[in-house]
Amino acid sequence: MIARMIAGGLAGLAMSLTPLAGKAEVAGFYKGKIVTIIVSTGGGTYTLVARTIARNMPRHLPGTPTMIVKNMPGAGHVRATNFMYNRAPTDGSHIATIGNSIPLHQTLGRKGVRYDARKFNWLGSTGITNLMTAVWHKAGVKTIEDAKKKEVISGGTGAGSGTVIYPMIMNNLLGTRFRVVIGYRRAGNIDLAMERGEVFARSGYSYGSLTRRHPDWVKTNKVYFPVQVGIDRARGPKGVPLLIDLAENEDQRQIFELFSGTVALGRPYLTTPKLPADRLKALRKAFAATLKDKAFLAAQKKTKFDLFPATADQVARIVAAMINTPADIVKKAKAAMTRSNTIKCKDFTEAKNCKSKKKRKKKKKKS
């Protein structure tokens, strides 16, 4: 009896010490290590937030490693994503923040996909505000119904960007009349074009970014918002309908939900597949603690970046829902993205900031 009690006691002690042993092992791995945060853009908000994460997250990770940020832009976030899936070390020394369009890119069967987003180990997300369609006050369009009756010239960057995709979806499914000028080098150039009267709208504009860059636009009603893209009204201005609210049937609703999922993902963070379970647990716990860290929150407040935290489980569920979208809905979504009523930069003589690729190539050859 006593032997059994002793054996049972020792077994219980061993079980109670297991978490401590696991934590010590994780601390031993990370002590003196450098953890790299890969950012799938060349700069911008993703990079600034990642640097803030890098300064604050080590305090919450056993072993207190040094964190550095490395930019890896290319192929619309795909380059960095492929790196994390296929080439990055799987020991927990690399994490990444990637574009929220990555699961959608996979779902739509776009080029370059050498990853399965469902198999990443997600850490969570810092979140973003909803994406707006902003229409200049002189356009005479305040609502989606107005946009169905009157043509609005809208600025666009690349064909795969939100500046082009969202107006195309609305044109093809809701009957709006956005005429998109494709080829602006940067989204910021579209803002200048709106102020100069060259174009009168921009889609895919984060509400947080818009209010930071152009607070006067909102305060003085220089722009109107006929629609916002997202799944949570609290992430945007009051009284503006969500795109999913405008669906006229169930198929449209599912298509709009698919494209709204990217907004729900915000600025997601992940690490590699095949990561040791104890290190994954530690990374997730440290990431969640960082988003509640006073120093991190103070830095976010100072820069006025929007913050809508999501857990690893929430991100994983959104990713799975997007990739598991029924095939018939995916097919209809692709059809809805078909470009219609568009103008190429080189054919749009009014735009001073809109330069065609052909012209840029000629300049390079001369130099």
Image (cartoon, grey):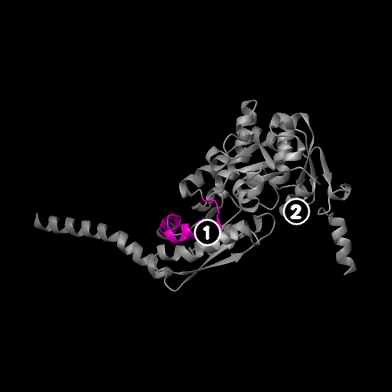
- In the rendered structure, which amino acid carries the disc numbered 2? Asn
- In the rendered structure, which amino acid carries the disc numbered 1? Lys
Looking at the magenta stretch, what is its main secondary structure?
helix
**Residue shown at 69%/53% (left/top)?**
112
- Label 2 SS: helix
For residue 188, the mark is: none
Q: Nearer the viewer, residue 354 or 337?
A: 354
Around disc 1, counting alpha carbons within 10 Å, would you say few (fewer than 14), some (14 to 19), or many (20 or more)?
few
**Residue shown at 62%/64% (left/top)?**
71
Residue 77 appears left or right of 12: right
Q: Which residue is outermost to the left?
A: 1
Magenta span includes 216: no
Are discs 1 and 2 less than 8 Å apart at CB? no
- The segment highlighted magenta reads 281-307
Q: Is residue 90 visible?
A: no
Question: Percent from the top left, x then y, of residue 267?
Answer: 56, 52
Measured in 3D between alpha carbons, the distance from the residue under mark 1 to the one under mark 2, in whole angstroms, is: 26 Å
Q: Nearer the viewer, residue 301 or 156?
A: 301
Question: Percent from the top left, x then y, of residue 355?
Answer: 83, 55
Disc with the residue nearer the chain's start (1 vs 2) = 2
- The residue where tag 2 is placed is 189
**Residue shown at 76%/46% (left/top)?**
155
Q: How many marks?
A: 2
- The residue where tag 1 is placed is 302
- Label 1 SS: helix
Q: Is residue 170 above or below residue 354?
A: above
Question: Percent from the top left, x then y, of residue 110?
Answer: 69, 47
